[in-house]
Image (cartoon, helix red, strand yellow):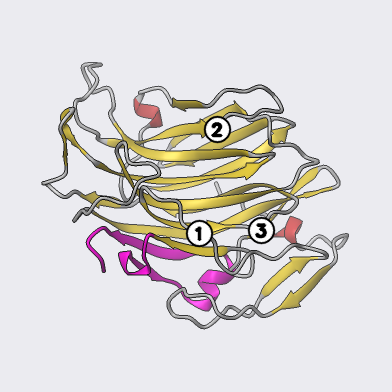
Amino acid sequence: MSLRNPVLFLCGCLLFSCTKKSGHTTSPISPSTSNSFFTGEVKPLASKSCFAGAYYRKLVSSVDAWGGIGGRVILPTAVFDPSRINPAKPMQFLDNPSVYMGGNMGGQETDIGLTWEVIRDENNAVTVDRRAFRPFLRRTAHSGSGQAALYENAPAEARYYWYPGEEVVMSVKIVANGILRLTVEGAGKKFEKDFEAGGYTFTGKGEFKRVNAIDQVSNEGKPVQATKTKVIGGEWKSSFLYRIVNGTLVETPFHDGRYTDMRCPNSNNFSIFSTADDRSKGAEKIEIYGAGY
């Protein structure tokens, strides 16, 4: 079931203006021509610095009255570099694919979505290798609420496993002050979880993101490790932001006038294809190549 609601976006009580954005480095590079904005909407930065430690494609919004993010995505397939074995867990690799969302509000960062994980097999035994995408929720500490940093996974149950090629609708949104809700739904399965995140409120301003990544084990904040791992076949059919309007959430397209385009550590690690129509609705095809494209 799609979360998109164009009626909300076109609601006559909101004032929009139209503009044409140029200069984004998606391929092909022609900008979309249907970018619309809320009155007074803050535009995104032209560029942002990469955070070391992973290969990732990120779209990140401006810091403004955003209340969440969502989208429809086809999950990718990882082809692992056989030389990149995790010595602590020889049946696993030092590279790991993930597709996730999140943001930063009130000084608190969140990463919330799907990562390639171990599962419980038909005998209820935890597998030694990673076999499916499972939901995860991560937050940094937050001084205002006294929250400590936290990481958790969805239960290792078959109803919460998703596989390459499956299509899911995923969203992260504020449902109450200090509470984010993750919803992942697709292929006849659904996971929903409310997650405490004190920095996220209906009166705050923050940024939201969507990310496709090759994460690297125990490498956060360090230069990426050379790898031949590649993650192919990922595709966003659409993506959208939630705008906080009079204390409620209004869904609006995450078009190419609303995001900073990040390809880290280098643009040649990615094959990204989108038409102007794709970019008007936050859609694109994404492949990640550790050894370069």
Which class describes the residues within 10 Å of circle 2: few (<14), some (14-19), or many (20+)?
Answer: some
How many badges with numbers are in the image? 3
Sort mark 3 into few (<14), some (14-19) or many (20+) by Cα contacts within 10 Å: some
Q: Secondary structure at mark 1?
A: loop
How far, Cα to Cα, is label 3 from label 1?
14 Å
Q: Which residue is mark 1?
A: 49
Tag nearer the camera, 2 or 3: 2
Instruction: Judge whether 144 appears above or below 229 on screen.
Output: above
State the quadrant of the C terminus: bottom left
Q: Is residue 15 visible?
A: yes
Say which of 10 and 210 sits in front: 210
> SS at mark 2?
loop
- C-alpha gap between disc 2 and disc 1: 19 Å
- The one nearer the camera, 36 or 267, is 267
Asked if marks 3 and 1 touch (Cβ < 8 Å), the reply is no
Secondary structure beneath dot 3 equals: loop
Q: Nearer the viewer, mark 3 or mark 1?
A: 1
Depicted 62 relative to depicted 244: above or below: below
Q: Which residue is mark 2?
A: 140
- Residue 2: percent from left, percent from top: 57, 50
Q: Amino acid at mark 2?
A: Thr
What numbered label is drawn on residue 62?
3
Which residues are the magenta region? Answer: 265-293
- Whether residue 66 is in magenta: the answer is no
- 22 and 222: which is toward the camera: 222
Question: Is residue 211 found left or right of 164 in the rendered image?
Answer: right
Mark 3 or mark 1: which comes first in sequence? Answer: 1
Tag 2–tag 3 contact (CB < 8 Å): no
Q: Position of residue 45 (x, y in %)?
A: 62, 65
Discs 2/1, front: 1
Callout 3, which amino acid? Ser
